[in-house]
Image (tube, rainbow, N blue to C red):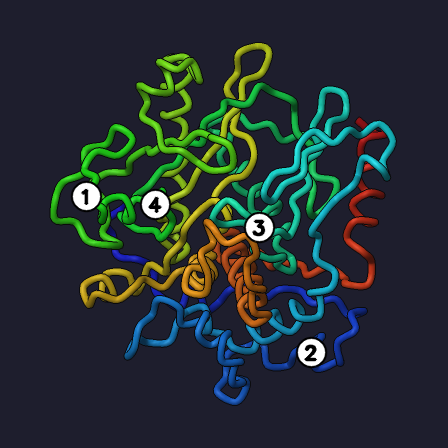
Amino acid sequence: MSPSAPPSALRLRGLPKASLPASSSFPPSARFPHHLSMSASSSRRPPPLAATAAAAGTGSGASPSLLAADPGHRDAVLLAARGAMANCLGETSLHLAVPGLRLAAKGKVRDVYESGEHLVLVTTDRQSAFDRVLASIPFKGQVLNETSLWWFDRTRHITPNAVVSSPDKNVTIAKRCSVFPVEFVVRGYVTGSTDTSLWTVYNKGARNYCGNVLRDGMVKNQKLSANILTPTTKAADHDVPVTPEEIINSGLMSKEDFDEARSKALSLFAYGQEVALENGLILVDTKYEFGKTADGTIMLIDEVHTPDSSRYWIADSYEERFSSGLEPENVDKEFLRLWFKNNCNPYEDAVLPEAPEELVCELAWRYIFLFETITNTKFEIPKTQEPIHERISRNVAQALQNL
């Protein structure tokens, strides 16, 4: 990451606003808030849990988070999210609605359908962590899909990708390829709360992780001297950290393919950090997936630098907060992970508590905030009257006819 000072907070305060549909069921004042610009009179007191989430990781005495820099915009998105809670895309069954589609796989967040030489990737609103679904987040599928499309388009100079088209806000049609059974996790900081996160294993005493030698004396949220790759592979229903040697020796990938994918992953991450910092954010860690076409081309697939696959912090406050022993201001789902860790055992409990609505809506806001911050474009909130599944089925059917 560039050592230059992060941009001023003013850069983030000028974000484009999410577009609220005029035909929604909200009252006129909610549909077209007259207070979208920052002003003292526009701020409303948020619900207690939402306020807690907005300040998650900020600690006592911290300056107000940039996530709440425009309270009118935030309140408008939270209101829209509450109105869309009943219209989240939790499950899909496009194979029953679109002729010729076959359900190939249901992932934690994406449902994959096959149609000839193409895959139809539907990004749902399911929220996953700890290798299980925690909740459904309004607008999440659209945010993830549109965020990935933005990054796919801007990383073609680093690697080709599988994208063919996007016929719907939640859908990407992609080329079929042979997927490598390895996730390329790249990290720039010692942080995290899951069992496979770098801080968790480091704090337990590990000093060699996935082939990376880690020096003694590091503390949580500290910047690494260089970005590192900590690949994982699937075992049953969870991720397992592996070394490059284990990947190659077990036959998961050839040395040539692994070396190329590793180089692409590290280049993608360095570029992502550069773009994030230009917009006042720190790209902390992320994961990539790659596939190989019949002609031997290694392509980027799945998703890129989304709030699901990545951790982001606010850049302006990182150094001061780190020096003071405070958690960074985060723009990801970490606060929801922590809520579940504090209220249950998300790895072992058969039934999890229901995520509070305030936290669900706060996460929807964070996803939209991140999209608008990175892309410098406004997020278009969809009309809530039409069921999402019906819209997707119609758009996919038409797109497949035109392929």
Mark 4 nearby-residue class (10 Å; few <14, some 14–19, many ≥20)? some
Q: Going from the N terminus, do you reach mark 3 or mark 2 first?
A: 2
Q: CA distance from mark 4 to mark 3?
A: 19 Å
Answer whether residue 22 is visible to the viewer in this image: yes
Q: Going from the N terminus, do you reach mark 2 or mark 1 first?
A: 2
Q: What element does badge 2 sit on?
A: helix
Pick the front one: 383 or 355 = 355
Q: Going from the N terminus, do you reach mark 1 or mark 4 first?
A: 4
Residue 313 picture location, percent across and down: 37, 57
Q: Residue at x 47, y 48 (%)?
A: 130
Q: Is residue 112 above or below residue 12?
A: above
Q: Residue at x 70, y 48 (%)?
A: 169
**Which residue lies under the disc numbered 2?**
30
Identify the amino acid type marked 3. Val
Q: CA distance from mark 1 to mark 4?
A: 13 Å
- Residue 344 as seen in the image, left or right of residue 81: left
Q: CA distance from mark 3 to mark 2?
A: 31 Å
Identify the amino acid type marked 2. Ala
**Which residue lies under the disc numbered 3?**
133
| Tag in front: 3 or 2 | 3
**Which residue lies under the disc numbered 4?**
197
